[in-house]
Amino acid sequence: MKDVFIIADNIFSPLGRTTKENFDALLHNVSAVKEHHNAFAAEPYYAALFNNDFLFSVLSGNNNYTKFETLLIASVDEALKQSGINVKDDKTLLIISTTKGNISLLESEVYDEQLQKRIALHTSAKLVATHFGFVHQPLIISNACISGSLAIITGMRFIQSGKYDNVVVAGADVITKFILSGFKSFQALSSSMCKPFDGARDGINLGEAAATIVLSSVKKNTDNIKVISGAVSNDANHISGPSRTGNELYQCIAAAMNDAGLSKEDIDFISAHGTATIYNDEMEAKAIALAGLTTPPVNSLKAFYGHTLGAAGLVESVISMESLKQNTILPTKGFEVLGVSQPINVCKKIIHKQINNCIKTASGFGGCNAAVVFSK
């Protein structure tokens, strides 16, 4: 099968408008998660949210797009500038990853037939595609919190099959009262900054961001990272509670490693989902241990970005790719003492060493799991 290269990428987040700005912030231990007091909740909460002036300065004067669509356009635009690809080419596809899209419109508009059409995910996808001139109808991937990772895997498979030469994969979500109250109803929100894999962890922080990667069958630069393989599975356990054993995520990790032709000794670090909830982190630790990967450093970026939902798999994948390029493994902010039952190697400080392969894992409501392998 064809090799699949990442020839351009972008992260547009409260930490910066480019991948470089974001990675530099992480290197300096800067987090976008802060305490907020607003109409989204009766009590203060911790989240990584955009300053509206910062966001809308990107598309000032254009009122045709929602905040969600503005995020997508800003991120895709930056990545396309780097890529040099022709979006009007018949062999180029746009994939959009999100969980909630324009759900916030339900909080401010009267629900009628017009709003029903406007709020549909495919409406936003078509607006973004039309903005840039993509010739194909865009594909929407919306599968809970693995959406971004699944979108990467889908794009990879399209290129490997020969159907497309280039796939632009973009993901975004914004935080709303509806989303915040939903996670609060699950008692999943932390009352402070989250602590992935830590003994004192008590829940997640939410976040908003957009991220884009451009996949291609043609290598552009010598440092282009490759998407080697990916796999998905489902726990079939519970609508919100993850597997008790971690076996299903382990199956993903094992399948991805097998397809990549890699052994456990070849994995240099793991970019975990690491939501800082009691059950997710325990399940993920069990899966990592089942895969025999208790030695490689494990990190979670949730205390830097919050959980960015449909963008999380993309944001964290882009950071993982930058880690590979810079031979730098980032720490898990908020982690102090191991609080899971398996002896996984949670990274507490920046590590500089030669690294060639990493695994990105993701899990979500409904029991969905994904694992993607990136390599130099």
Image (tube, rainbow, N blue to C red):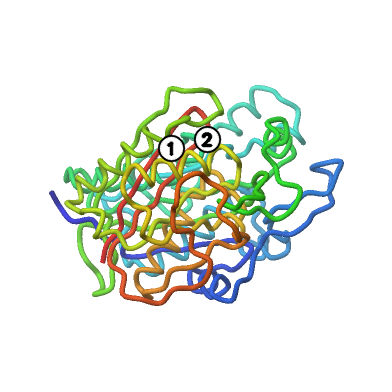
Q: Position of residue 274 (x, y in %)?
A: 52, 49
Number of marks:
2
Q: Position of residue 20 (x, y in %)?
A: 49, 73
Quarter of the image containing the C terminus? bottom left
In what element is the residue under mark 1?
Answer: strand
Mark 1 or mark 2, earlier in chain: 2
Q: Position of residue 117 (x, y in %)?
A: 58, 29
Residue at x 33% of width, y 59% of height: 358
Q: Is residue 111 above or below residue 84?
A: above
Q: Are marks 1 and 2 in contact (CB under 8 Å)?
A: yes
Label 2 belongs to which residue? 121
Residue at x 68% of width, y 44% of height: 202
At label 1, the amino acid type is Ile
In what element is the residue under mark 2?
Answer: helix
Q: Position of residue 231 (x, y in %)?
A: 30, 40
Report how far apart the C-alphas of labels 1 and 2 lie in the structure: 7 Å
Q: Is residue 88 above or below residue 54?
A: above
Determine the image quadrant of residue 116: top right
At label 2, the amino acid type is Leu
Residue 109 versus residue 13: which sits nearer the camera?
Answer: 13
The label shown at residue 140 is: 1
Determine the image quadrant of residue 33: bottom right
Residue at x 75% of width, y 33% of height: 109
